[in-house]
Amino acid sequence: MALSNAQKQARWRAHNVLVLTSSAATIAEMLIEMPDQAKLRSIARKISAHLARNRKLTRKEKHNAANFRTNKRGWRELWLGCGRTSKEFAQLWGSEEMKAWQQAINEAGDRAVKLAWERDHPDQEWPKHMRGLDTGDTRYHRWRERWVRSREFADLCANPRKLLALAAHAREPR
């Protein structure tokens, strides 16, 4: 005997309608057993995104997020100081080109510190690893604090093109 329309609708509801008044385990089980797995993945992504947006951050996560924003702002200022645009920065943030540019700036900063150290300490050799200067010896820290407050450092920070020129010079073979 053929099913009536009401019976067909009842059968369809049993298979397809998810009753949200059930327990979480039952709802999850019904979702997992869905024949349309693409829809299940979409639902899972949306729930995951919602939970990620609305969860409470730990103190460390808040601190890391603040540092990230500060660092990104600093990189953006350097980027704009090199004559590039905000739009380019937004498009390239996180790209390989941006990472290469940041590495060049970092190398230039290291080069600037090394040149300043060698100028101020002509009788001392620049250590291969900065950790040698960091461990227990406060002389480097005092010198670096004085150098960071210097006009030379301020000039380098204000003119990223000088930093990039130092980076190019650092990459030249000797």
Image (cartoon, rainbow, N blue to C red):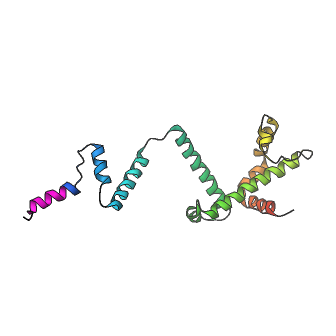
Quadrant that contains the C terminus:
bottom right
Q: In this image, 1 relative to 27: left or right? A: left
Residue 44 vs residue 120, the one in the foreground: 44
Q: Main secondary structure of the magenta part?
A: helix
Quadrant that contains the N terminus:
bottom left
Magenta-colored stretch includes residue 8: yes
Mark yes or no: residue 81 visible: no
Residue 17 vs residue 14, the one in the foreground: 14
Position above or below: 100 against 138: below
Position above or below: 127 against 159: above
**Residue 51 percent across, percent down from the top left:** 40, 47
Residue 84 vs residue 95, the one in the foreground: 95
Q: In this image, 82 relative to 142: left or right? A: left
Q: Residue 105 appears in which quarter of the rendering?
A: bottom right
Residue in the image at 22% along x and 49% along y: 19
**Residue 147 percent across, percent down from the top left:** 79, 45
Q: In this image, 82 relative to 19: left or right? A: right
Which region is colored magenta?
1-13
Mark yes or no: residue 90 visible: yes
Marks counted in the figure total 0
**Residue 29 percent across, percent down from the top left:** 30, 49
**Residue 134 percent across, percent down from the top left:** 77, 39
Magenta-colored stretch includes residue 14: no
Residue in the image at 14% along x and 60% along y: 9
Q: In this image, 142 relative to 86: left or right? A: right
Residue farthest along the top direction in this orientation: 136
Residue farthest along the front direction in this orientation: 1
Q: Residue 64 appears in which quarter of the rendering?
A: top right
Residue in the image at 59% along x and 46% along y: 67
